Image (cartoon, rainbow, N blue to C red):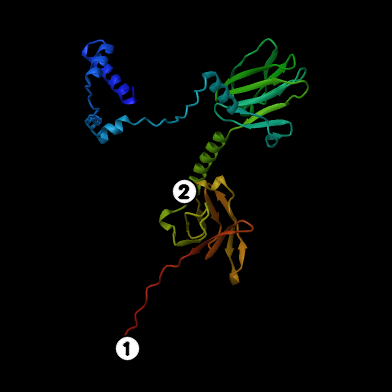
Amino acid sequence: MNRLTVLTMSSALGLAACAGKPPVEAAVGAASRGEFTPAVMVAPSPPPELPAAPLASHAAAEDQRLPIPTTRRRRAPAAAPVARVEAANRAAVREPSQDGYVNAVQVYAWSEGALYRLYTAPERVSEIALQAGESLISVAAGDTVRWVIGDTTSGSGSSRRTHILVKPSAVGLKTNLVITTDRRVYHVQVESTAGTAMASISWTYPADELLAVQRGEGAAEAAAVADGIAVEALNFGYRIEGDDPPWRPVRAFDDGSQVFIEFPATLGQGEAPPLFVSGAGGRTELVNYRLRGRYYVVDRLFAAAELRLGERRQQVVRIVRVEPAQPRRRRGRSS
């Protein structure tokens, strides 16, 4: 049996199996009868075409994009109320300074709500001096067991002054004092050390001093302008020229015998400039004058004067009297 016969029998066996007959009998019968079916090469069918997916719209594509992660700064947690109170107290404490000492007395500038430090030591008495004429109402201390606190006075009348005396019983103690008077409230932080004690503390009062200056200026100004001066006789024919410092005069006028130079209201806050009058030959010379409120009162008339202040870069303001213009006399024709 050759190779062709074997292949034919194998094909017949496959066909017989598909027809439902026993594969052996179908193959033998087909070979004995000489029936052969040539094999046919069948081309594979192409795969079915799938429908194209619709293109996504721009808006849909925008929606499908993944969000870009952003880094947000975390806010610092708000400080606890206790921390805020401690920070405010630290900022309000006024410590002793070298420039604030007058001999052994530490002089603070009084300010509403400030906490003033007082260092004490056992077996030593420290003093708190109030303003002259100020009346003590009460003294309250945080620790009244380990601190000895008393008060006394000095002087009499308007110069009567109250002194509060403080002494600790041990080292390393801390407490506070609240001192109320008829004018203000003092807050003092008291601390005891091993051997260093402040002899005394007191205060300056900028607001009271400014008020006193303003009252004095007002009274002096009224006296300077209204004391025996006839307003209708005043001559305002003066010109102010030169530099423009903060103390530059507002105007100048005379009453026929004295010259009045008016300055801004802030004259008392700085150094007042000296006055020089131009004399014979153009030389400047000092002249008698006095300060009354915010006016210089010069005891004589002058044609020109200068106010000078400073050394390296001197500021100069000139005050020049302007002579009234004389009417021109017309020449008459001779007949």
Q: Kindly indicate the quadrant of the structure image that contains residue 33.
A: top left
Please rate how many residues cluster around mark 1, counting C-alpha atoms within 10 Å: few if below 14, some from 14 to 19, many from 20. few
Secondary structure of the residue carrying tag 1 is loop
Please rate how many residues cluster around mark 2, counting C-alpha atoms within 10 Å: few if below 14, some from 14 to 19, many from 20. few
Residue 322 appears anywhere in the view: yes
| Residue at (31, 23) in percent of width and height | 7
Q: Measured along the vertical axis of the image, is residue 172 above or below residue 223?
A: above
Name the residue beneath numbered marker 1: 334
| Residue at (55, 21) in percent of width and height | 83
| Residue at (28, 12) in percent of width and height | 24
Q: Earlier in the sequence, mark 1 or mark 2?
A: 2
| Residue at (53, 54) in percent of width and height | 245
User: How much space separates mark 1 and mark 2, taking CA atoms?
Assistant: 53 Å
Q: Measured along the vertical axis of the image, is residue 271 above or below residue 81?
A: below
Indicate the position of residue 287 as horizontal and vertical percent values: 60, 59
Name the residue beneath numbered marker 2: 226
